[in-house]
Image (tube, grey):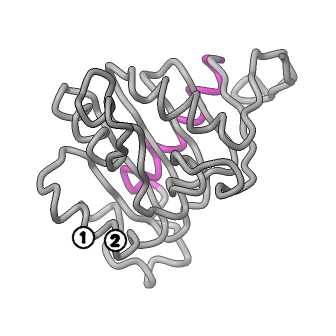
Amino acid sequence: MAATSTISTGYPRTIRAKLLVDGAHYDELVARAIARATVSVWISTANLKTMMVEAPIGTRARARGRYVSFFETLGDLARRGVDVCILHASPPSGPLRRELARLGDHGVELRRCPRVHLKMIAIDGKLLYLGSANLTGAGLGAKGEGRRNFEMGIVTDDHAMLDGAQERFDRIWRGRECAGCKMRRECERPLDRR
C-alpha cells in the first residue's frame, strides 16, 4: 500500500505503509515487532495503563495460555540492552503504579509531559507506527474482539517518516520544547530539568 508524505522533503512522495485496524495493533506491533526488538522501542501515548500480553513463547505460562504484564516484556527487552522509552501525558493508572512498584527497577524509562497526545511507536529505527492506539489494554493489549477500542493506524519502514517522528519524540523527551511551553506551570517536573 502506498501513501503520500511531505515529511522532511517538503514535497509529496510515495511511501510504503500498511493499515492496522483493531486487533492487528496487538498482533503485528506488540506480539511481533516489539517482541523482536534488538535496539530500541520508543513509545509515545496520551494514556498509560496496565496492559496484558501473551506470556513469552517457550515458557510454562505460555503453554498454560497465561498472560503477563506488558511491562514485564518491556523490562525483559531493557535487560537485554534494548533502549525502552515511554513518553506519556497522564499519570500511570493506579493498577499500573502498583504493578511498576512490584516490578521494581525494570529498566524502562518513563517521562511525562502533559501536552503529549501523539501515539507513536518506533522500533529499532526501522519500523514506525502512527495511529490512534494508546498504551492501554483496550488500545494495544491482548483484549478479545468486542472488548477492545476501535483503533486505526499505519506502520511504515519509510526512513524520512521514521527520522521525522523520532526527531519529534527526542525533542520532547529531552525537554527541548519546555522553554516555550505555555503549560509549564502545570508540569510536575519539566523535562528540561532532568
Mark 1: which secondary structure? helix
Quadrant in which the N terminus is drawn: top right
Q: Amino acid at mark 1?
A: Arg
Mark 2: which secondary structure? helix
Which residue does the numbered mark 2 point to in the structure image?
Answer: 95
- At horizontal 66% and vertical 40% (from top left) the residue drawn is 23
Q: Nearer the viewer, residue 172 or 123?
A: 123
* Mark 2 touches mark 1? (CB < 8 Å): yes
- At horizontal 35% and vertical 62% (from top left) the residue drawn is 191
Q: Nearer the viewer, residue 187 or 2?
A: 2
- Residue 115 percent coordinates (x, y): 55, 67
Determine the residue located farthest toward the front in the rendered image.
Answer: 64
Which residue does the numbered mark 1 point to in the structure image?
Answer: 98
- Magenta-colored span: 158-176
Quadrant in which the C terminus is drawn: bottom left
Q: Quadrant of residue 138?
A: bottom right
Measured Cα–Cα span from mark 2 to mark 1? 5 Å
Task: Report the side of 76 relative to 57 (left or right).
Answer: left
Task: Report the side of 103 relative to 109 (left or right).
Answer: left
- Residue 72 percent coordinates (x, y): 26, 44
- Residue 178 percent coordinates (x, y): 44, 64
- At horizontal 72% and vertical 33% (from top left) the residue drawn is 20
Q: Nearer the viewer, residue 53 or 182?
A: 53
Relative vertical location of residue 7 with respect to residue 70 in this rendering, above or below: above
Relative vertical location of residue 148 with respect to residue 16 in this rendering, above or below: below
- Residue 141 percent coordinates (x, y): 51, 48
Q: Amino acid at mark 2?
A: Pro
